[in-house]
Image (cartoon, rainbow, N blue to C red):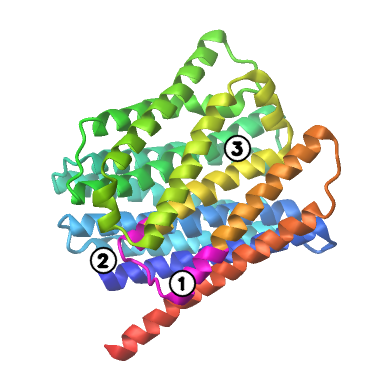
Amino acid sequence: MQFYLHKWLRIAILNLTIVSFIGIILRYKIAFSLPFIDQKQLLHGHSHFAFTGWVTAALMALMVAFLYIKGLTDAFKRYRWLLITNLISAYGMVLSFPVEGYGLFSISFSTLSVAVSYVFAVYFWKDAKRLQLTSISRYWFNAACLFSVISSLGAFALSFMMAAHVIHQNWYLSSNYYYLHFQYNGWFFFACMGLIADKLELLQINHKWSKAIFYIFFLACFPAYFLSTLWMPLPVWLYVLVIVAALAQVVGWFMFLKIIVSNKAILNNATSKTGKVLLMLSAFACTVKVLLQTISVYPPISDLAFGFRPIVIGYLHLVLFGVITLGILGYMASSKFISLGKTAVTGIIIFVTGMIFNEIMLLMQGAEGMEYVYIPYSNELLLLAALIIFTGLVLFVTSQYKNKILNEANA
């Protein structure tokens, strides 16, 4: 199992490095001239590849490993073709979107990625049921697969509008935020929580709140979508429901943190220093996220949040990098699924430094727009942040492949 899992995780981390490299090109084009690059089309390829080539590839591999550990001994053989097809769709999108935008090939590859998510969901549900798993982690994973399927409705709506050249601003934004919400707060978040829940169960940390926390987040996820559409006129009853959902997520998250703090001695002994730091940073980012969601229900703040692009981009990066990426890397490190030699740790430190720097600069750009002041070299500094992130990831991914070669040589 270790051989197959390490192989798929190395590929996913390499893809994260490619995502970072594309980010450098995007930042360079904003700061300087790069006329032969279509910014919007490259951005589509960048985001789709980040979702499919990095996060989905890593989460699918880790969920297959979960099934293997629980008794499905042929798990990696059974899911191999799905993992490969997911990568094909990811590479297809990162190559086709920059060339044609929403066109025949890009829509075909994005449709293929959706088909993979459907089949993966069906396979996982059936295998988890066949193994007769009753743990709370199964709840999280099943819900993650469900949200992955649900999110595709937004992707289909976007593809249809772009291909048919029939774009209504409100419908376009609503479909885009629908897809993002059920990917970020559904598929990504619930899969990560499933991994953490399984980790807690292996350490025999079973709390009476565990199932309640799951149901809070599961039920709140549906109305929480409208947190992304507060710029549209909503009926009063729906607005109240959105407020309840936002508050429920805060309650659920702090209930979860209470369990973690109550068992910190057990977790400290079972988690590497690097893994612990990454998971703590991820938890901090998630705390910021749920609090930001809550205060965004206040109309003036909502107007500010959706009125300035750097704030939106900063929030999306906070979730993708801060919550999800650090959460996945922290889980890998704590489970010893990645090499943590000196080069790897150095790379992680540089990556996290660049990520924090990037968030600070995006926050400053948002403040710049709100206060109508000019911050010198802000675009150049964001390019520097992208270079720092990329440098850290290059060191990190190089260490993983170097460790693979050394292990094979010593085998």
Res. 263 image quadrant:
top left
The secondary structure type at the circle numbered 1 is helix
Q: Mark 2 or mark 3: which comes first in sequence?
A: 2
Quote the CA–CA distance across marks 2 and 1: 29 Å
Q: Amino acid at mark 2?
A: Lys
Q: Quadrant of the C terminus?
A: bottom left
Task: Verify CB contact (< 8 Å) between mark 2 and mark 1.
Answer: no
The answer to whether residue 91 of the structure is visible from this angle is: no
Magenta stretch secondary structure, dominant: helix
Magenta highlight range: 331-350
Q: Amino acid at mark 1?
A: Ala
Identify the residue at the far front of this view: 265
Rendering coords of residue 315 (x, y %)? 60, 41
Identify the residue at the far top of this view: 236
Q: Amino acid at mark 3?
A: Asn
Res. 186 image quadrant:
top left
Q: Is residue 244 above or below residue 9?
A: above
Quote the CA–CA distance across marks 2 and 3: 35 Å
Q: Mark 2 or mark 1: which comes first in sequence?
A: 2
Identify the residue at horizontal 33%, vertical 66% (top origin): 337
Is 151 covered by the magenta stretch?
A: no
The secondary structure type at the circle numbered 2 is helix
